[in-house]
Image (cartoon, coloured by chain):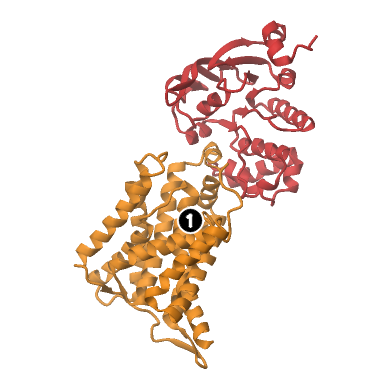
């Protein structure tokens, strides 16, 4: 059974349909990547799964339960966390407060404190900057913070919307190293990327979204073999 | 010179109530990016409701009336949220402005009808206390106004910076989408912000009533304007800004009342606003970051 199952989802802004019937599945324990050009509906899909946007039609089930149209806090409580595009940290709150906000729904103070320690162990830069306002962090540090904040809700499925956007190559590698690490720790990951080269190194399954519809679904091998996709997303210089 | 100092100190002490009203406007703006035009009227309304304590229990001590105003302010705040915001499309910039202006007029009308348009006496506290240093005096009732206001502000800052609700409030005001992704309920934080600002307003209204000695529906409009001026001068969304600006406006208007009389006073307050709008439109404490 799949962990996340999206069926014929239509999400619209007024009359404009950004998602025109999207269906896809994310297997438990997998790393799944959604590729696609600007404006294809990648962010809309992530926001719809997280409950910020309400789908007009279609179903979304998580771990066998229907979550389409539910409120974001309900979806977080069920174990889905989204690291949004552009990170969206709370700029005038400290790093520590950002992490506490991520654990907002959890009542177990002791376990939250332990998780914060765990995040600081994984992201040592965040520990150094614990008392600093998040707005003063570099882009890479903010991305780490956004990931750590999302993990503070102890998600079973981590959604990430373009985690490498606007970051230096070294930082991007760091982000992908963390994605692989989280996966080893048992978190399922479904992420949006434009950087197909990096995505190919970690993801086990790919979807391609174009103009609000899924146009390809397959393994990394199948993706690399597809002539059209290779030209559009991997550059013609490949092979 | 002594007159000047006296006017400044009396004004600054009374200005603490303006600071409270300014905080109310600024907090709601911070969380929802909307102006609650009914805020000052609901605050005065809360102070009126405090008088009900005297109806129920003749000869009740003044502090009980204040407590009643505080509680009633919170209830009114929640009612303003429910009637003027909850069911109104927030995407339309004018909708909540109109609904809250309507509420402002409604509260005014209700007060006029219930009291037959007569000003109501308000219980005083410490009005017979007077601290003297030569010719310079500190009025006991104004010291009470200032002291209670400071206590309320400290309480608010503790709430904002040391509680779960405060964390949620700040998160929503800085980044509403991310706050929702953290599992924070936007609607609940919005409603509770109205309750908290209502509590503040109720106590501010009672303090104004106590230092003036009476309440009148004529208070609501000038107080609305003052509150908005304080909010703009302090910087929209900044609580420390509202505090400083409230005290500043209080001192400023009292000095001009001394030299130019009560009828001209508000003219100069408007002029002060104008100066800020031209030279420092972000206010004294322009907030470090809004939503991007």
Chain letter for the part of the structure drawn in red: A
Q: Position of residue A189 (x, y in %)?
A: 64, 24
Q: Position of residue A32 (x, y in %)?
A: 64, 19
Q: Position of residue B206 (x, y in %)?
A: 36, 69
Q: Position of residue A190 (x, y in %)?
A: 62, 23
- Eyeballing the image, is A231 above or below B237? above
- Eyeballing the image, is B93 above or below A46? below
Chain letter for the part of the structure drawn in orange: B
Which of these two is toward me, A193 or B247? B247
Which of these two is toward me, B28 or A4? B28
- Eyeballing the image, is A75 above or below B39? above
Tell me the residue that label 1 is attached to.
Answer: B26
Residue at the location (66% across, 26% down)? A186
Please indicate whether residue B157 sits to the left or right of residue B64 in the image: right
Q: Is residue B197 visible?
A: yes
Quadrant of the frame with the N terminus of chain B: bottom right
Which of these two is toward me, B213 or A29? B213
Residue at the location (70% across, 44% down)? A117
């Amino acid at each position: 059974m799949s962990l996340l199952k999206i069926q014929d989802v239509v999400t619209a802004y007024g009359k404009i349909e950004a998602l025109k019937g999207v269906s896809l599945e994310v297997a438990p324990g997998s790393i799944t990547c959604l590729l696609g050009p600007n404006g294809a509906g990648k962010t809309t899909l992530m926001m719809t799964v997280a409950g910020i946007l309400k789908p007009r039609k279609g179903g979304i089930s998580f771990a066998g339960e229907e979550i389409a149209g539910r409120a974001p806090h309900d979806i977080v409580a069920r174990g889905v966390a989204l690291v949004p595009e552009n990170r969206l940290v709370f700029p005038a709150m400290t790093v520590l407060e950002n992490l506490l906000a991520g654990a907002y729904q959890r009542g177990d103070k002791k376990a939250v404190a332990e998780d914060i320690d765990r995040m600081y162990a994984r992201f040592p830069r965040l520990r150094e900057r614990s008392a600093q306002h998040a707005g003063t962090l570099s882009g890479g540090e903010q991305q780490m913070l956004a990931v750590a904040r999302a993990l503070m809700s102890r998600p079973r499925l981590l959604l990430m919307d373009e985690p490498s956007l606007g970051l230096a190559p070294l930082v991007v590698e760091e982000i992908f190293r963390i994605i692989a690490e989280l996966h080893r720790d048992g978190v399922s990951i479904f992420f949006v990327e434009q950087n197909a080269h990096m995505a190919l190194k970690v993801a086990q399954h790919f979807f391609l979204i174009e103009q609000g519809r899924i146009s390809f679904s397959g393994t990394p091998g199948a993706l690399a073999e597809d002539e059209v996709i290779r030209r559009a997303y991997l550059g013609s210089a490949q092979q | 010179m002594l007159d000047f100092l006296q006017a400044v100190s009396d004004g600054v002490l009374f200005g603490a109530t303006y600071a409270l009203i300014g905080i109310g406007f600024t907090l709601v703006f911070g969380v929802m990016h909307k102006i609650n035009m009914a805020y000052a009227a609901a605050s005065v309304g809360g102070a009126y409701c405090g008088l009900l304590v005297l109806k129920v229990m003749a000869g009740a001590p003044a502090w009980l009336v204040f407590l009643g105003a505080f509680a009633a302010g919170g209830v009114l705040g929640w009612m303003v949220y429910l009637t003027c915001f909850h069911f109104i499309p927030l995407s339309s910039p004018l909708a909540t402005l109109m609904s809250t202006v309507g509420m402002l007029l409604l509260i005014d009308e209700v007060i006029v009808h219930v009291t037959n348009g007569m000003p109501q006496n308000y219980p005083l506290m410490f009005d017979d206390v007077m601290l003297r240093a030569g010719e310079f005096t500190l009025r006991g009732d104004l010291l009470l106004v200032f002291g209670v206001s400071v206590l309320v502000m400290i309480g608010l800052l503790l709430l904002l910076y040391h509680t779960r609700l405060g964390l949620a409030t700040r998160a929503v005001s800085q980044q509403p989408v991310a706050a929702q992704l953290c599992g924070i309920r936007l609607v609940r934080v919005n409603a509770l912000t109205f309750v908290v600002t209502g509590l503040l307003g109720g106590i501010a209204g009672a303090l104004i009533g106590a230092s003036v000695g009476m309440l009148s529906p004529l208070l609501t409009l000038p107080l609305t304007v003052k509150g908005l001026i304080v909010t703009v001068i302090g910087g929209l969304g900044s609580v420390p800004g509202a505090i400083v600006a409230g005290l500043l406006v209080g001192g400023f208007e009292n000095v001009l009342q001394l030299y130019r009389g009560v009828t001209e006073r508000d003219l100069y307050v408007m002029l002060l606003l104008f100066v800020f709008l031209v030279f420092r439109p972000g206010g004294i404490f322009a907030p470090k970051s809004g939503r991007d």
